[in-house]
Amino acid sequence: MFFLYQIVIQISTVFIRVAAFFNAKLRQFVKGQNRLFEALENSIDPAKPVIWMHAASLGEYEQGLPLITQLKSEFPGYQVLLTFFSPSGYEVKKLNSPADLVSYFPLDTVANSKRFLDIVNPRIALFIKYEIWPNFYKEIEHRGIPLILISARFKPNQIYFKWYGGMMKTALKRVSHFFAQDEQSISLLANIGIDRTTLSGDTRFDRVSTIAQRDNALLFMRRFKEERFCFVAGSTWPQDEDPLVRYINQGSDSIKFVMVPHDIDPDSCDDLVKRLHKKAIKFSNMVLEEIEDYQVLIIDKIGLLTKIYSYADLAYVGGGFATGLHNTLEPAVFGIPIIIGPNYRGFKEAEDMVALSGINPVKRYEDLKKWIDLYFSNAEFRQKAGFVNESYVRKNQGASVRIMEHLRTLL
């Protein structure tokens, strides 16, 4: 099986390079891979030890961020290297992260794992959630580097727990310690003979808690909202936007709407504005002195959503009608009710808040209209649902504290 994995990786490498001629994101990925090792050799300071954290993309980065911040504070003599597998994560955070160095993660070949570790020589390797790479894990173990999996969450249907998952199961057994989000993950690991586990919870709760405590003031949002009811739809996909646009066009003129699309491509945002019958404008075209005259604001800039949620009376989190639900904890921490699409199974925090009635999933336009109208007209009902979400976030804080207690013994 391990031999077949090597063949698949090599074939995938060739396929990605060919496909990059026809896909902009893959071209970006290949370009980053080509200069990865040279960039690391030029930026790593051999006189300072390295703490290495790897995240697949932005979602996993958010889980690792509280630890990066704490590690930088407690161990200033170390360099913190952050790697991403996806171009979206790397491109957004390469110049905007508390880590000392940000790099692409090399494709998981034997040669790449050896060369990467020769250059970086980390004191410790921190991988987040689902990032299991057999060649890297084998080489990390061979070199005696502590390998920690953070905010891990496993499900019975994953390959690690199947009769044919021997190679991936072996990779898991190379991990020095697991910090798991839930009891099920610990039980599944125990069933395959892994007991180096701690129930820590999800570090994203710590991350969003720091977001709520910072200064979230935005002058344009204060002027746009004007003390009126504000509905924020964040990280929306086209499938989310169809019922939302219908509601906005038919809804009350007393509601202010903010839409923050997942894809801020100019043509897509322009099309969204054209579909709206209410007075709408893109953030990039906004004139601050005139913003209160508009009813719908389309945010076509990255990095504003979490602060915008602080102005919301009600939030919609996108992805539930599309490929996967986005982060519901970001609005929840501000004590507001949340509406989502129907596909939220597998997102534990969403499942929990649905069960607690702080989140309302909708399957069709009529469901969406019912919940928005109810929250708009009933302030007491709205406040109760928001309190449920805020309390849920507060109750689940502390994962970073538990993990840091262990990391201090290794550094």
Image: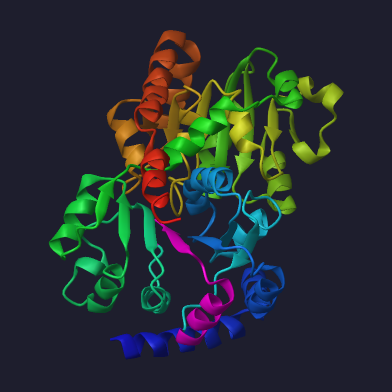
Residues in magenta, as a range = 110-130
Residue in the image at 64% along x and 60% along y:
101
Residue 353 % position (x, y): 34, 31
Residue 388 % position (x, y): 36, 21
Depth check, front residue: 82 or 321: 82
Residue 267 % position (x, y): 73, 53
Left or right: 389 as drawn, with respect to 231: left
Give the colour scheme of this rendering.
rainbow
Q: Is residue 270 magenta?
A: no
Depth check, front residue: 300 or 194: 194
Q: Would you say residue 343 is visible in this rendering?
A: no
| The N terminus sits in image quarter | bottom left
Left or right: 396 as drawn, with respect to 252: left
Q: Is residue 124 magenta?
A: yes
Depth check, front residue: 110 or 270: 110
Residue in the image at 63% along x and 30% along y:
308
Seen in the picture, residue 151 relative to 273 is either above or below; the reply is: below
Hey, which quadrant is residue 133 in on the image?
A: bottom left
Seen in the picture, residue 235 relative to 137 is either above or below; the reply is: above
Hey, which quadrant is residue 41 in on the image?
A: bottom right
